[in-house]
Image (tube, rainbow, N blue to C red):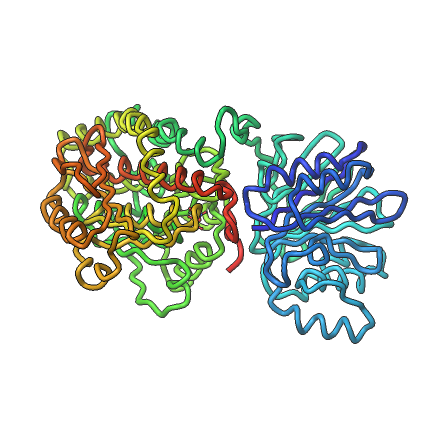
Amino acid sequence: MCGIVGAVAKRNIVSILVNGLLRLEYRGYDSAGLVVVHDAKLERVRSAGRVAELGQKSANTYGELGIAHTRWATHGVPSERNAHPHMSRDLIAVVHNGIIENYEELRTELTAQGYEFTSDTDTEVIAHLIHSHYAQGSLLIATQMALSQLVGAYAIGVVAADNPHQLIAARKGSPLLLGVGVGEHFVASDMSALLQVTKNVVYLEEGDVVEVNLANYRIFDQLGNSVQRQVHVSELDNDSVELGEYQHYMQKEIHEQPQALANTLESVCNSQSLVPGIFGAEANTIFPQVENILILACGTSNHSGQVAKYWLEEIAGIPCNVEIASEYRYRTSVPNPKTLVVTISQSGETADTLAALIHAKSTGHAFTLAICNVPESAIIRQSKLRLLTRAGPEIGVASTKAFTTQLAALFLLTLVMAKLRGRLDAEREQQFLHELRHLPAAVQKVLALEPKIAEMAKHFANKHHALFLGRGMHFPIAAEGALKLKEISYIHAEAYPAGELKHGPLALVDADMPVVSVAPNDTLLEKLKSNLQEVKARGGELFVFADAETHIKESEGVHILQMPEHAGFLSPILHTIPLQLLAYYVALEKGTDVDKPRNLAKSVTVE
Ligand code: AGP
């Protein structure tokens, strides 16, 4: 979704703004813009294209105070006139992430006051509102007054033409960070934009407003009280967001999975036994009381939850439900205070998942656990317990290493729960720990299949549809494979539990419908083989991702990719890798924008 960068310094900050926006490109955007304050004037540059174009257009611009934005259209088409910053009477400029729900009403009121609107955005009302209060002289107070009139979600940056060393920023429902430098300060919607200038960061809290000056800053909470917030030193380094030897971030992130898994599992693999404390100190008292588990997440993160349901019920014997966060938040459910509510999110800022968590708490759920890749994110801060996946920054819109590390974290949850419920004896625990230690190496072996998968991908380049089949805990993996393919190659792909085939989707099967099947060597293999026969008999072309011992023969119309080993309960993690690679190479064949697929954003911070 949209990205924000702001800076106040004693040097030209235009390249900082542009480089920051380049770092935020991965979030997804359709236009970009910046404004600087120079000689008591606002100088605005906007582009309906890429940030690189904005960089060219602003090459001769100078300013020591400015704000910049990448826009992901919500209100109004992607165009230069709708690109941020939005201005009011050449005095106030605003960038905004989020959605203002009462903007129509405010627009009518402001129009009646004589304000002229030059865009179709909801954001422009913020600029005029601030302007309408600015007569009183303080940009901070004018912004606070304007914010009190807004309904919705926002992260904003504000500057005024007659205030050359001050930037106001605020957040509610959308992420925003303050970067602390020496005699200079910055704001951004995520850390990757700030690494070029500082590692010292303050995570602004819900409702915070910050007045940022050259030498200092002041933070006010949602009640307007002046507050202190801790300065953290980010563990991210610039290299972790560099592309390096890879062609795309998605390819890089697929290849980072062995390391990401090793990092996520590090504390556990170095110990001899599993303890609830890895989820936070309070887990020791909460976990023994838990009667069932409710998992809330969206997209890929929801798929990891669906795999975990199989693990939690079979290994730990604990009932588990998995819900789409955007559905759960609006339905009437029956809360059980002994339920552990688990939210799963790469970003920790997904609006639907965050809202579902807040909704669950409002209905009386006190046991909350976040499995998340971003420390200090909103979802982490809203949860009692947490397990951080240590995948490192994920830049590609298509989630890859975040997914497999989520699975690893959920497997740990399963084992801890199983142990507490007397379903994991010492021998089995050691066996599972051994398998977890081996996991990064096993994933590495699967990655070696990349050239074969690249060849296979050629069969998909001119197809318009694909079916993905799986059974049991591999059905969510098939669903994840279909999501990856549709997301980055724009081929329509659907996943079905293979047993459902003859209840409808078989009607679609013909030579133009490739059928991808996840076929590990498990108890459902024989049934899956029959399902595959049904496809073959209808002239369908099969692509089977089989284990070493699966024994399905290659023949005309049946392409087999043999996995190096079978990983038992951890097999869903291994079987994910070839499906990620398949989607990646099909997208390459089709020449789509792999890391920034059309219409999609990395962090979905609006509803
Ligand atoms: C995955 O490839 C998608 N980009 C998307 O489904 C994503 O997983 C979803 O939006 C949830 O995001 P989160 O994990 O950051 O909450």
Position in image of residue 280 (x %, y %): 37, 39
Which residue is nearer to you in this view: 92 or 476?
A: 476
- 204 horizontally vs 109: left or right: left
Q: Is residue 358 above or below residue 414?
A: below
Q: How many marks?
A: 0
Which residue is nearer to you in this view: 578 or 258?
A: 578
Which quarter of the picture shows residue 409?
top left
Which residue is nearer to you in this view: 296 or 317?
A: 296
The structure residue drawn at horizontal position 59% and vertical position 41%, both measured from the top left corner, is 24
Position in image of residue 102 (x %, y %): 63, 70
Do we see residue 275 in this rendering?
yes
- 404 horizontally vs 53: left or right: left
Do we see residue 376 in this rendering?
no
Which residue is nearer to you in this view: 55 or 189?
A: 55
- 586 horizontally vs 201: left or right: left
The structure residue drawn at horizontal position 47% and vertical position 37%, both measured from the top left corner, is 394
The structure residue drawn at horizontal position 19% and vertical position 41%, both measured from the top left corner, is 556
The structure residue drawn at horizontal position 41% and vertical position 63%, both measured from the top left corner, is 329
Position in image of residue 208 (x %, y %): 63, 51
Position in image of residue 269 (x %, y %): 29, 26
Which quarter of the picture shows residue 291?
bottom left
